[in-house]
Image: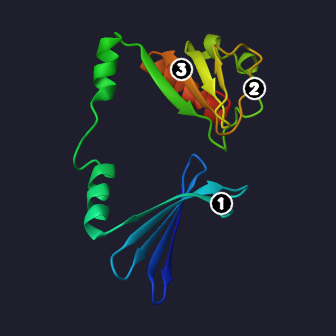
Amino acid sequence: MHFKETDLPGIGRKYWLHTRSGEHLIIVIHNDERRDLFHMEAGETPEDVGDMLSLVTLDDEEARAVAAIVGGMTYKPKFQEEREVMLEGLLIEWLRIEPHSMSIGRTIGELNIRQATGAVILAVVEKNREKQFNPGPDYVFASGATIVVAGERDQIRQLKRLLSDGRL
C-alpha cells in the first residue's frame, strides 16, 4: 500500500492511496468540509493514475458516517466464524491475484496447487469479468483475476503464500 498526502492551497488537502490490489483512491478534503472520493483506474506504476471510474461527494456528516462504517466502529463481521461452523471447517474464499504476485504467468499445474496445498480452485473471474468454472491445470494466473477457492484454513493460508511468493 502506498499513501501520499498533499496540501492544496486555497482548496484543502489531498490524500492519494494505491491499494495492494492495484487500485487508486484519491480523497480531497475541501476547506468547506466537503469530501470528494475519486476511484481511479490503475496504471502501469503505483504513481500512474488512469481515468476516473467513479466520484462520490460527501458532506461532513456523511463522511463521518462512512468513516465509522469502513473503520469497523459500527459493525464487526462475524461471517468468518459462522461460515466455518456451517461448513465444518471448509472455507470458501475469494482471492485476488495481486500485481506483484509471483504466480502471474504460471499455471495451476506448474504450481501443483492441489497437491502442494490441498486447496481446490473452484472458479476464476478475470479482470475483464470473463468467468471460468473449475479451471484445469493449464489455467495461467493473471494480475487482477479473482479466484474462488475451497479448503481448510491452513490449506488456504498455504495457497495464499504459494500464489503470492511462488513457494510454500
Q: CA distance from mark 2 to mark 1?
A: 28 Å
Query: Left or right: where does residue 61 sit relative to residue 131?
Result: left
Query: Left or right: where does residue 36 sit relative to residue 141?
Result: left
Secondary element at image label 3: strand
Look at the picture and state if 34 lies above or below 81. Answer: below
Q: Nearer the viewer, mark 3 or mark 1?
A: 1
Mark 3 or mark 1, earlier in chain: 1
Residue at image location 74% in from the left, 16% down from the top: 109
Name the kind of residue labelled 3 in the image: Val
Residue at image location 31% in from the left, 56% down from the top: 66
Estimate how packed mark 3 is, as few (under 14), some (14 to 19) or many (20 or more) residues with alpha carbons within 10 Å. many
Q: Specify the quadrant that holds the N terminus.
A: bottom right
**Position of residue 162 measured from the top left corner of the image (x, y, whole percent):** 62, 28
The mark tally for this picture is: 3
Look at the picture and state if 113 lies above or below 65. Answer: above
Q: Residue furthest left?
A: 74
Residue 168 appears anywhere in the view:
no
**Position of residue 145 measured from the top left corner of the image (x, y, whole percent):** 64, 34
Image quadrant assignment for residue 51: bottom right
Q: Specify the quadrant that holds the C terminus.
A: top right
Estimate how packed mark 2 is, as few (under 14), some (14 to 19) or many (20 or more) residues with alpha carbons within 10 Å. some
Q: Which residue is mark 1?
A: 51
**Position of residue 54 measured from the top left corner of the image (x, y, whole percent):** 53, 57
**Position of residue 42 measured from the top left corner of the image (x, y, whole percent):** 65, 54
Mark 2 or mark 1, earlier in chain: 1
Numbered label attached to residue 140: 2
Q: Which residue is mark 3?
A: 149
